[in-house]
Image (cartoon, grey):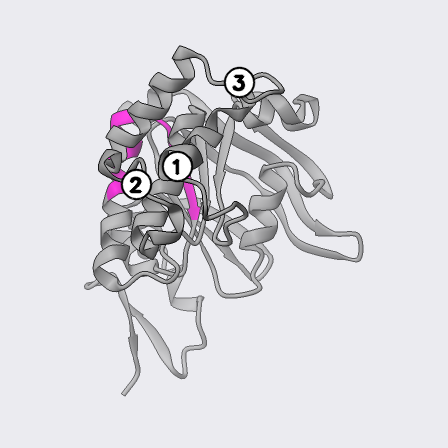
Amino acid sequence: MKNKEAKTILSTQHLSIGYEDKVVAQNIELNIKKGELVAVIGVNGSGKSTLLKTIIKELTPIAGNVFLEEVAIENISAKEISEKISIVLTETHFSKNLSVKELVSLGRQPYSNWLGILTSKDKVAVQNALNLIAVQDLAHKKCSDLSDGQLQKVMLARALAQNTPLIMLDEPTTHLDLYHKAFVFKMLKKLSKTTQKAIVFATHEIDLALQLCDQIILVNNGKVIQQTPENLIKEKHLEHLFPSDLIQFDSISKSFKIKS
């Protein structure tokens, strides 16, 4: 009941996505509320990245609309978007000579002046983000000295320092082992509840997403479906995600299994 009454952070209406010569998916209806953890799943090339790029205004919709807090994204400036969406990409584009604290401080760029000087409010936001992700002990360590798992946590701290209602991540568990993948998923789940931010991420870790996410966005064969994990399984959408000659979905264990 709580999420049904929660504020809508991201929504789409009659959205079609793709490129000039190709429609990737159409008639997309999404509704993501504050405090929800949402995974975007689908096979390679299904359109997950196209959907995310359209939401962050990197691609123009072929038809329909994207809304951030009920305002059409076409009416939102780039600066305003940076105050509404923080993005964590798989590929990092920053100098690894930066310290952890310096990298997290970059999350305050949308609010700082052209010199990038941090106010006392900015500094508090940075320290709070470091504390929330429990990386305060790494604050003065160079990013080049971090493990993949540590760097992913620091990138998430940067997103939290940006203090937006929506956080979007592209494959946040790439290069991580199973333990650290589960750790990141549980951390995202906890953050979505404690901060009441909407957190949306693309992932290939479908089994983990089904266990921990509030909503799943399935991109498959030109269609995009948003449902709870339970309904997605109940309506057997996952059974058609991969070719059935090799892989089948087991609704009891909520996992994919290789056919013997």
The type of residue carrying mark 3 is: Tyr
- Which secondary structure is most common in the magenta stretch? helix
Considering every residue shown, the one lying at the far top of the view is: 120
Between disc 1 and disc 3, the foreground one is 3
Q: Nearer the viewer, residue 173 or 20?
A: 173
Asked whether the viewer can see residue 1, the reply is no
Looking at the rendered structure, the secondary structure element under dot 1 is strand
Assign the C terminus to one quadrant of the image. Answer: bottom left
Left or right of 183, for residue 39:
right
Relative depth, front residue between 86 and 110: 110
Q: Is residue 161 above or below residue 50?
A: above
Check residue 111 in the rendering and tell me which mark sits there, or answer none: 3
Marker disc for residue 199: 1
Q: Residue at x 47, y 53 (%)?
A: 90
Using residue 25 as the reference point, say whether residue 1 is left or right of it. left
Quadrant, the N terminus: top left
Give x and y (percent) for residue 234.
Answer: 31, 54
Residue sitting at 56 percent across and 52 percent down? 49
Question: Where is residue 226, by image quadrant?
Answer: top left
For disc 3, the neighbor class at 10 Å (few under 14, some 14 to 19, many from 20) is some
Please state which amino acid type lies under the numbered disc 2: Leu
Q: Which residues are magenta?
A: 187-201
Which image quadrant is residue 141 in?
top left
Q: Which residue is identified by label 2?
A: 188
Q: Position of residue 134 (x, y in %)?
A: 22, 36
